[in-house]
Image (tube, rainbow, N blue to C red):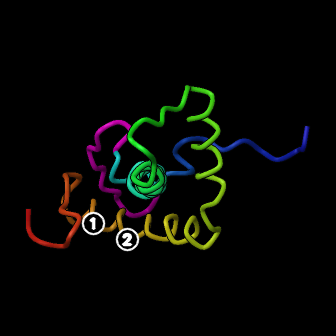
Amino acid sequence: MDQVPGRRHEDTKPTQPHRLLSLPRRSPDLNPLDYTVWAQINRRMRKQESTWAASKNENRAQRLHRLCRTAMNLSSGFIDKALGNLQHRCKKVVEAHGGQFPEDGSQA
C-alpha cells in the first residue's frame, strides 16, 4: 500500500462543465492510420504496381512482404506529421459538433 488516501468520484469532478461529442466508433477522421498512413502505403503500392508487366502476379506472402517493406520505408517525419495533424483534425471535429468535415476545407 502506498498510504495515499483514495479519491472519491466527487473529488475529481471538473470545475468547468465538459461538452460531450457523439462520435462514431472507430472514426476514420480521428485515426491517423486510416486518414494518412494507410492511404500513403496504398498510393505507394499502386505506384509500384503501375510499373509491372501485365502478366506479373504476386502471391499472398509476396504481397504481405511488399506491404511490410513499403510501410517500413515511411519516414519518421511522415509519421510525426500524420500524428501532429491529429490535433488539427480534433479541432475540426469539435467545430463540426461531432459530425463529418470536408477534407479540403470547404463547407460540407
Question: What is the number of the mark on residue 29?
Answer: none
The magenta-colored residue range is 14-27
| Above or below 51: residue 104 | below
Say whether residue 19 is magenta: yes
Per the model, the C-alpha gap separating discs 2 and 1 is: 6 Å
Residue 1 horizontal side relative to residue 37, left or right? right
Residue furthest top in the image: 60
Q: Residue at x 72, y 41 (%)?
A: 6
Say whether residue 90 is magenta: no
Mainly helix, strand or loop, the magenta region?
loop
| Above or below 62: residue 80 | below
Q: Residue at x 35, y 64 (%)?
A: 89
Q: Residue at x 35, y 57 (%)?
A: 18
Q: Secondary structure at mark 2?
A: helix
Name the amino acid, label 2: His
Query: In the rendered structure, are the residues bearing label 2 and label 1 in contact, judged by CB atoms less than 8 Å apart?
Result: yes
Which x, y percent locates residue 12? 55, 51
| Above or below 79: residue 58 | above
The N terminus: image quadrant? top right
Q: Residues within 10 Å of mark 1 (few under 14, many from 20)?
A: many
Location of mark 1 (residue) = 92
Name the amino acid, label 1: Lys
Location of mark 2 (residue) = 88
Which x, y percent locates residue 100? 19, 53
Q: Residue at x 43, y 45 (%)?
A: 53
Residue 75 horizontal side relative to residue 26, left or right? right
| Above or below 88: residue 51 | above
Residue furthest left in the image: 108
Picture quadrant where residue 19 is located: bottom left
